[in-house]
Amino acid sequence: MERVSVPVPGRPYEVVVGAGVLDRIGELLPDLPGAEVAFVVTDPAVADRVPALASGLEPRRLRAVPLPVPAGEEAKTLDVYRAVVQQLAAREAHRDDLVVALGGGAVGDLAGFAASTYMRGMPLAQVPTTLTGQVDAAIGGKTAVNLPEGKNLVGTFHQPRLVLADVETLATLPERHLRSGLAEVAKVALTLDPELLERLERDPVPVVARDPEALTWVVARCAAAKARVVAGDEREAGPRMVLNYGHTLGHAIERLEAYAGRTHGEAVAVGMEFAARLAVAHGLAAADLVGRTRRLLASLGLDPDGALPSVGAIEQALRLDKKFRGVVRFVLLAGVGRPVVVDDVPMTRVREVLLEMGAPP
Ligand SMILES: NC(=O)c1ccc[n+]([C@@H]2O[C@H](COP(=O)([O-])OP(=O)(O)OC[C@H]3O[C@@H](n4cnc5c(N)ncnc54)[C@H](O)[C@@H]3O)[C@@H](O)[C@H]2O)c1
Ligand SMILES: [Zn+2]
């Protein structure tokens, strides 16, 4: 079991990572004065984990009440949000009770939003069951639901009291979702954790094969990296931008594919290949960054190649990015572990790199 502290100002919390830690939630939760019920917002894919969680909560005299929601992204709507808070009201939840998010990043975002708004805020525990959730979404306190107009447009910052990442839950995760999470792992390794990078380069096999010990180590390293960044920038004013490495192009691709093509991680993998090439073209990084990035992604089962939308379409999508302020800002690497935010990359260079990657004009 690994414990990582997230030292946000005011109320620091822990990320606990390990195999089979789910039923230890009772001993790991901090003091919750007045809490009687734990409302467990649950993705159907992991509903069979509710009993373990419930028995873990028993010693704390917390009664577990499951609140099932639709699987994955379908849960992140205002309608589902309304259903959840109405359930809380119907069951007379009070503000000292606990909300537990049991599921992937989608359930985490939805349950977090409900917990942060019902009665102006209830305590929240994140129990992420996807790799993306464990290394990224559950840590940092961002919550959101989607609108038809765009993703994550309505949300809050609401830090959890505990993040409990049981790597055993990842055993049932579909391969494609595992790989999507591995893209975020690669992102952390390239931008923030050279030791993690070296370990993955030395031997990626146990991680890809979901060896619980390897996953525990990797998830804990990623959690620690995110914790460091988040603690220094709780509300995403600056340093947290580093976590967007590969995401500027990644988001553009996802949007252009109407969220029905590549997964988030697959799009981010392409984005990291692009960022590496751009850093070299911009004179920031040495040429071997591209090869190193490609080898890492390939070893994790990610394909940075594949058909790209047209350069024109990508350029337009980049301009629609919510971080667009007249220029496109990119997180680039001056070398592994040395991220910098640049806003002086001329569009012509962006186009050149996209053409070099095989995007049609
Ligand atoms: N708040 C943040 O900081 C943050 C960061 C990154 C991503 N996100 C959000 O997270 C979401 C993506 O999260 P995700 O990749 O975890 O996807 P997800 O929550 O949509 O889950 C992916 C799929 O896996 C299933 N699933 C979950 N756990 C499982 C398990 N253990 N075994 C088998 N199936 C399982 C789900 O039912 C779903 O179909 C997006 O909505 C994204 O916006 C938020
Ligand atoms: Zn991401």
Image (cartoon, rainbow, N blue to C red):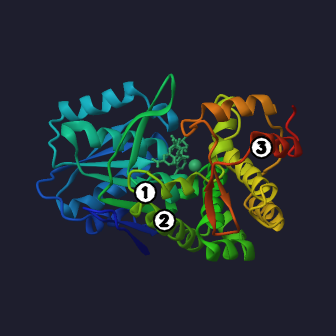
The amino acid sitting under disc 2 is Ala
Where 258 sits versus 335, above or below?
above
Kindly check if marks 3 and 1 are in contact, taking CB atoms under 8 A apart as contact: no
Q: Nearer the viewer, residue 235 or 184?
A: 235
Disc 2 residue crowd, few under 14, some 14–19, many 20+, Cα 10 Å: many
> Horizontal placement of 282 versus 118: left or right?
right
Most extreme residue toward the left is 34
Quick check: marks 2 and 1 in contact, CB under 8 Å? yes
Q: Quadrant of residue 21?
A: bottom left
Q: Position of residue 167 (x, y in %)?
A: 51, 63
Disc 2 versus disc 3: distance between alpha carbons? Answer: 32 Å
Circle 1 residue: 139
Q: Which residue is mark 3?
A: 350
Q: Quadrant of the C terminus?
A: top right
**Label 1 amino acid?**
Ile
Does residue 318 show up? Answer: yes
Disc 3 is placed on an element classified as helix
Q: For mark 2, what is the residue?
A: 223
Q: Percent x, y for residue 104?
A: 48, 47
On the image, the x and y values in percent for residue 209 come to 68, 65
Q: Residue at x 43, y 53 (%)?
A: 138
* Callout 2: SS: helix
Image coords of residue 62 (percent x, y): 20, 55
Q: Is residue 58 left or right of residue 335?
A: left
Identify which residue, 213 or 139, lies in the foreground.
Answer: 139
